[in-house]
Image: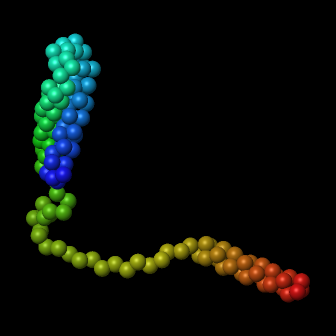
Amino acid sequence: MNPDTVTQFFQKGFRVTLGAATSLIETLQDPKGQTEKFSEIGTDFGRLTEELETKGETTEQEARKLVDTMVAQMPNPFGPSSSSSSQTTTVNTVATPVADSGVQADLQALTEQLASIRQELEDLRNQDS
């Protein structure tokens, strides 16, 4: 199967699905008008597919225009700065750990307790053997 054919198949499927979703929304908004339109088509699935694909393509193009418009209106955070100074300044920082002295004391006490418990366990093992 030709890759272009596969791409076209999936694109057509996407557009038909998009057209069906659009038609569903339109049916919910105007049930009478859409029911008449689909009753004209009847059981001609080829025509129905073409209608849905056309509607999906139109919806896709409208969505693309909307997204392109929104993207064009957004400021570019990675582009040049809008300020008048075009100089860049490098700031060097050094990360230093910040620890509360109370937390360090608690940690030291717990470490000592753990060491003494280990020693007691080792002594008990030596007594049993």
Identity of the residue drawn at 22% across and 39% down: 13
Foreground of the two, 27 or 54: 54
Foreground of the two, 23 or 66: 23
Foreground of the two, 22 or 54: 54
Relative image position of residue 81 (x, y in whole percent): 14, 63
Identity of the residue drawn at 69% across and 75% down: 110
Relative image position of residue 61 (x, y in whole percent): 12, 39
Identity of the residue drawn at 18% across and 22% down: 44
Relative image position of residue 70 (x, y in whole percent): 16, 45
Q: Is residue 83 left or right of residue 32?
A: left
What kind of colouring is applied to the model shown?
A: rainbow
Residue 64, image quadrant: top left
Of all residues shown, which one is farthest toward the front?
Answer: 1
Relative image position of residue 14 (x, y in whole percent): 22, 40
Quarter of the image containing the C terminus? bottom right
Residue 65, image quadrant: top left
Q: Is residue 104 left or right of residue 63?
A: right
**Residue 80 in the image: above or below residue 46:** below
Q: Is residue 63 visible?
A: no
Of all residues shown, which one is farthest toward the right?
Answer: 128
Q: Is residue 12 visible?
A: yes
Foreground of the two, 119 or 128: 128
Identity of the residue drawn at 34% across and 78% down: 93
**Residue 62 in the image: above or below residue 31:** below
**Residue 85 in the image: above or below residue 49:** below
